[in-house]
Amino acid sequence: MCGLCGQMNFSGAALDPSLLESMKQALARRGPDDEGSWFQGGVGLGHRRLSVIDLSSHSHQPMQDKALGLVLVFNGAIYNYRELRADLLAQGYEFFSEGDSEVILKAYHRWGADCVARLQGMFAFAVWDERDKSLFVARDRFGIKPLYYSLNNEYFRFASNTQALLAAGDVDVSLDPAALHQLFTLHAVVPAPRSVLQGVRKLQPAHWMRITANGETRTECYWSFSATRTQADLSENEWLEAIHDSLRAAVRKRNDVADVPVGVLLSGGLDSSLLVALLAELKIDPIRTYSIGFEDIGEERGSEFEYSDQVVERYATLHHKIRIPNEEVLQRLPEAVDAMSEPMFGQDAIAFYLLAEQVSKDVKVVQSGQGADEVFGGYFWYPRMQADTQGQPIERFSRHYFDRDHAEMQRFLQPDYTREDYTTELIRQKLAAVQADSFLDAVLHLDVSTLIVDDPVKRVDNMTMAWGLEARVPFLDHQLVELAARCPIEIKLKEGGKYPLKAMARGLLPDTVIDRPKGYFPMPALKYVRGEFLDFMRDILNSSACRNRGLYSRSFIDLLLSAPEMHFTRIQGSKLWHAALLEYWLQRHLPTDSCHPE
């Protein structure tokens, strides 16, 4: 619900106010309602506010409690803040505001680092503690809210996006070979703490970090979950009922904890349609829904209105149907890339960007369906992995998920970037570390805890917050995820996957919505690499900036350009688009001639 930033100089030298102003300017679109700064010696905190809870000036940030010696900047929403507030009141704390921000301040004072385990919601925050001259930063369990940082011998700098870190200057922008390897293998996912830039790192989900005045850091994980059968005695019907109850509660929390109306991004798929049905079960009226569609190209449909219209009709929602002409897609693409904190290959990023622009004119908060496929096994590659029993877990995973094998990466990128198979080793370690009863249990755990953070979740946060629109994701409620992780994999994969959600939807949604093949944002103008879109990518990849960067093998780029609609990844991503998007992101965000590996 905001943008935050700050810096701590280890020398104690006073922070230049213009540095913080530059950072805040790069965060302005995340928080259009208010802004503020706080300074003390070598520490400065900045904030841009999107007012969602406690709309009054009492929740202005940075929020200072002089009596407690604490200052806070916070982005997100704490869904159990009222319960925590009541607990803290009972313990003698006094409050000057009605929102969730001050609850974090008091909770930190009462419980220290342990406070984060008590917070239910999505959050990234920083607390300056005057008592011991330390900075405490934390991120929610699934990384729904971002927290980027830059750390060197002189300072610790943090912000809600990469753009703010770069705006302050003096950041190492050379490319990280391991991160690039992961980017091109995992569909643009670079798991925290890395980013494609050597000088930019991300706080891992479910972690906190404390930074002392002399630059010492301590990082700890405060939450994890297992994928083991601790409740195997439940029947299938009992599992379905428990999941229904848990998801309904998650939807309720994300609707009720706001002092502004909350809408739903309705794609016409099962997940978002189910959110509408659950809101109806909860007697929410009116239900505000928003759908986007593009022009058809030949036989390729450009919208899913035929499905979303059925949901709208059944529940009589207050609906907004948004149509975008195809020529606007390419025209607006630079804006969407500018809004990306990191390179994002998902072609629906531009769809989310254009949808959020229109939705933000009507509401400040929406619920969205991200996470359902990862939590409940909805992607087509899960059954394929389950059926493939040959080899080690990493081999079963990579055959169906990796965009490229290491051998292709060596043909694609210059040798300085491919000295090791960084991705295979990372995923091998992460699969082995999961407490899981089966291989596929471990895969879903990896997807939910790591991969989803830096693809759909990050994409939706970036594209919605570019318009001051907060997206809430009930399928990533941590109590729901804990429950679903214990549900037998056979139940989740039944009927092609996501069976608990399909069973829940029977009678609530039209069967045509439930039984339709899984879809994505239909964007024919970007799916077929031809015409103006192909010219756009060719210009990027043949530019002097791209050639001088020395990242790609020219022979491989020429191969992709010679047959742009023939080179796809295992999950049908365009390899040409991946190469063009990274180069375009670098050109839009970085100074030239600054991206060679060390």
Image (spheres, helix red, strand yellow):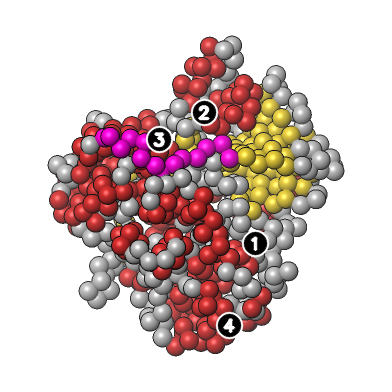
Q: Name which residue lies at 56% across and 32% down.
A: 116
Say which label, 2 or 1, has the lower sequence index. Answer: 2
Q: Which residue is mark 4?
A: 553
Q: State which region is magenta.
A: 221-234
The answer to whether residue 544 is left or right of residue 490 is: right
Disc 3 and disc 4: Cα gap in Å? 46 Å
Q: Residues within 10 Å of mark 4 (few under 14, many from 20)?
A: some
Where in the figure is residue 124, as x and y percent of width and height? 57, 40
Disc 1 and disc 3: Cα gap in Å? 34 Å
Disc 3 vs disc 4: Cβ atoms closer than 8 Å? no
Please state which amino acid type lies under the numbered disc 2: Arg
Where in the figure is residue 263, as x and y percent of width and height? 34, 41
Disc 2 and disc 1: Cα gap in Å? 33 Å
User: Of helix, strand and loop, which mostly describes the magenta segment?
Assistant: loop
Mark sitting on residue 479: 3
Q: Residues within 10 Å of mark 3 (few under 14, many from 20)?
A: some
Q: Name which residue lies at 54% across and 87% down.
A: 555
Q: Height in image: 130 above or below 316?
A: above
Mark 3 vs mark 4: in front: 3
Q: Name which residue lies at 40% across and 38% down.
A: 482
SS for callout 1 = loop
Say which label, 3 or 4, has the lower sequence index. Answer: 3
Which of 532/179 is in front?
A: 179
Say which label, 2 or 3, has the lower sequence index. Answer: 2
Disc 2 vs disc 1: Cβ atoms closer than 8 Å? no
Where in the figure is residue 312, as x and y percent of width and height? 21, 46
Which of 285/100 is in front?
A: 100
Mark sitting on residue 197: 1
Q: Is residue 14 visible?
A: no
